Amino acid sequence: MNDAHAVSNKVLYGYVVVFILFIFSYLEQFISGARYIKYLVPVFVLFFYVLDVVRTRELYFVRSRPAYPFVFLVFYGLFLSIFYGESDLRDLYFLLTAFAPLLFLGTVPLLYIDIAAKVLAVLYLIEFSMFGSVGEISFIDSKSSYEGTISFLFGFFVLWYSVRRKWIFSLLFFVLLLLSLKRIALIGVVLGGGYLLMFRAGRDLRYIEKVIYIIPIFALVFSLAFSLGLISYVLEDYFGVSIGYLTMGRSFISAYVYEAIAGNGMVWFGYGPGVVYEYVSEATDAITINLHNDYLKIFLEYGVFGFLVFFALFARAVQGVGVVFYIYLSCLFLTDNCLIYPQVLFFILAAIDAEGNDCE
């Protein structure tokens, strides 16, 4: 057996277990506590890697550029936790769960993503038929009677199958996206799909590929304006729309958290992972601890330095049609908590990694 074939088998066998763990975590409706099984992924991957190193007697490293920015967040977060003892290291473990397979196993076999998509679709339809039906879909408050973070994966699969020109499956997952509606996922699909159309049309997209470096800057400026109330004035004065209603109260939460952490000056180096949880809890009387804005979360927890380094590394890792998935994730970052959704991050990073390898 040659080395290339051995490595191929290692990746195949390792990812079988990884995908089983991620998919099993979506059985919470049937098995209480199933959602926690995905957190075994880093343990398994590291164990699998060590066994392989012992077997081959060769220490090796897998090149996975989309994982590097998240590796940086983990190490920088650990560094900050030395100075801020109240840091929540669970956030770092969530990130590790998302990128560990890419870092220790390598590029995901594309067939596995295809199989996982179909299995998740079947599981969702079974759960949908047993536990929920959509009585009303509102594009204003993003409510349906049965929704969840799996909607973010359905949006990803719409784009995944569109990239591969499998339009029937793309349409199927678009329907599932609507049934499990998350507004920002729908917006991400529209924007990512728009880029894909231009990419397929052979347009010169070099300027857009450069723009992805400044997307996070614009998103952060928007988030800060949002937190300072500047956008609410515009909406209410010119359009008569309450920003509190439109954001389901999240504008007030982000304003409170920003003032509590950054009110005394610029956050240059951050205060450590999880620092926003305490202030979100205060703002909501302990109803939730999530900020629902990953741009603002990274800025406040890792500072200007961490924010710029993370997104610079991330933009450099994106090539070719992988920009489609980067745009999609950029949208999710704006109004949700994808940094603590390892299964969502894993699939998107796996797609960016696969497309990057196709370009090399």
Image: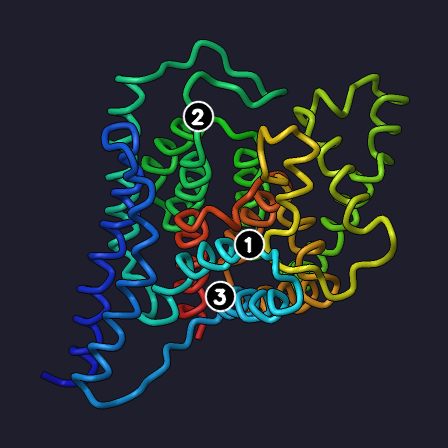
Q: Which of the two discs, 1 and 3, sits closer to the camera?
A: 1
Residue plotted at (45% across, 36% down): 149
In this rendering, position of residue 265 left or right of residue 156: right
Residue plotted at (64% across, 43% down): 278
Judging depth in this view, the residue of 157 and 65 nearest the camera is: 65
Position of the N terminus, as image quadrant, is bottom left
Residue sitting at the far left: 1
Q: Which label's residue is closer to the chain start, 3 or 2?
A: 3
**Other-residue count near label 1 (Cα within 10 Å), few / some / many at <14 / 14–19 / ≥20:** some
Dot label at residue 66: 3
Q: Which of the two discs, 1 and 2, sits closer to the camera?
A: 1
Look at label 2 and name its amino acid: Glu
Q: Which label's residue is closer to the chain start, 1 or 3?
A: 3
Q: CA distance from mark 1 to mark 3?
A: 24 Å
Q: Secondary structure at mark 3?
A: helix
Judging depth in this view, the residue of 336 and 134 nearest the camera is: 336
Q: Quick check: 193 above or below 253? A: below
In this rendering, position of residue 65 left or right of residue 61: right
Residue holding disc 1: 88
Q: CA distance from mark 3 to mark 2?
A: 29 Å
Look at label 1 and name its amino acid: Asp
Residue 319 visible in rendering: no
Q: Quick check: 275 above or below 254? A: below
Q: Which label's residue is closer to the chain start, 1 or 2?
A: 1
Dot label at residue 147: 2
Residue contact between numbered discs 3 and 2, judged by CB atoms under 8 Å: no
Report x, y in % for residue 136.
49, 11
